Image (tube, helix red, strand yellow):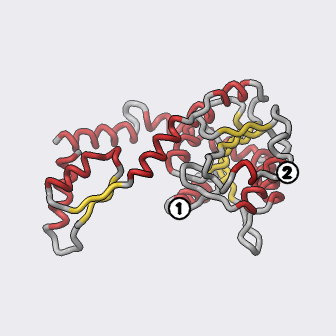
Amino acid sequence: MPGKLEELIENINGSDKDKITCIVADELLGWALKVAETMQIKSTFDKQWTWKFSRLLLLKDSTCLEWLDQQPANLVIYVAFGSFTVFDQIQFQEFALGLELTNKPFLWVVRPDLTDNNNDAYPKGFIKGAATRRRMVGWAPQQNVLGHPSVACFLSHCGWNSTMEGLSNGIPFLCWPYFADQFFNQSYICDVWKVELGFNCDENGIIKQGEIKNKVEQLLNDKTFKARALDLKEVVSKSAKEGGCSHNNFNNFIEWMKA
């Protein structure tokens, strides 16, 4: 991989186009920083992001799987907004009340920094609600959760990893993108694959609790979303097996790196 990066930089910097003058990476990609040093290019890394990412991995709460075991099949709303989504307190409370209004069991990944002062951000009485119908964790073993038979839908920020994990398990989506490619991913999930519903904001840019309740009910009551999600699960499974397009493309990529 370092050799390929050097080759890419040499080709770009040898052309008439804009030059690469700096490499930005985190500590998990230390080899990229070494390439920068070898080629005498400036470099920088984000130590705080690396620390945050590692911390979240360590906080994975597997006890939520035991809670899922106690839930009815195909009924739980799984909610996870990735590593960077942030809510203000108004939207956070509307979201919590919206989940409560669905009257469905839900597993909600609430990072310590999802909103300011998480403990005080919840609506009054929310934390003391029926523990059998709700579970909040700081971080979850997402692939295991999405593969659990009790999970009915995935309310997601539409990050690409989450998108692929949901599709691989035949789970329909409720999409709440936050930034960057997540909006493009949402349009693909909704308009091309048709396994998703999105949310509409009010005049103040807030997604209200009633909108959340209505979209959850619409998704779960329309069985075509689940049927299409299961069809895509089969497509994904075949593509990853030997002879499938993803399997072949990955092997071609490995051979290219070895060359």
Q: Is residue 172 visible?
A: no
Q: Nearer the viewer, residue 153 or 80?
A: 80
Q: Nearer the viewer, residue 118 or 76?
A: 118
Q: Nearer the viewer, mark 2 or mark 1?
A: 2
* Amino acid type assigned to the residue bearing label 2 in the image: Lys
Q: Quadrant of the C terminus?
A: top left
Q: Residue at x 46, y 41 (%)?
A: 54
Lower sequence index among marks 2 and 1: 2
Drawn side of residue 143 relative to residue 248, left or right: right
What residue is disc 2 on? Answer: 124
Q: Residues within 10 Å of mark 1 (few under 14, many from 20)?
A: some
- Callout 2 touching callout 1 (CB < 8 Å): no
Q: Nearer the viewer, residue 236 or 203?
A: 203
Q: Quadrant of the N terminus?
A: top left
Percent x, y for residue 188? 55, 57
Q: Secondary structure at mark 2?
A: loop
Q: Residue at x 60, y 58 (%)?
A: 177
Q: Residue at x 17, y 75 (%)?
A: 16
Whole-number angstrom distance, CA of label 2 to CA of label 1: 36 Å
Name the image quarter holding residue 85: bottom right
Q: Secondary structure at mark 1?
A: helix
* Disc number placed over residue 184 in the picture, else none: 1
Drawn side of residue 149 relative to residue 140, left or right: right
Percent x, y for residue 257? 22, 43
Q: Is residue 149 visible?
A: yes
Q: How many marks?
A: 2
Percent x, y for residue 84? 55, 54
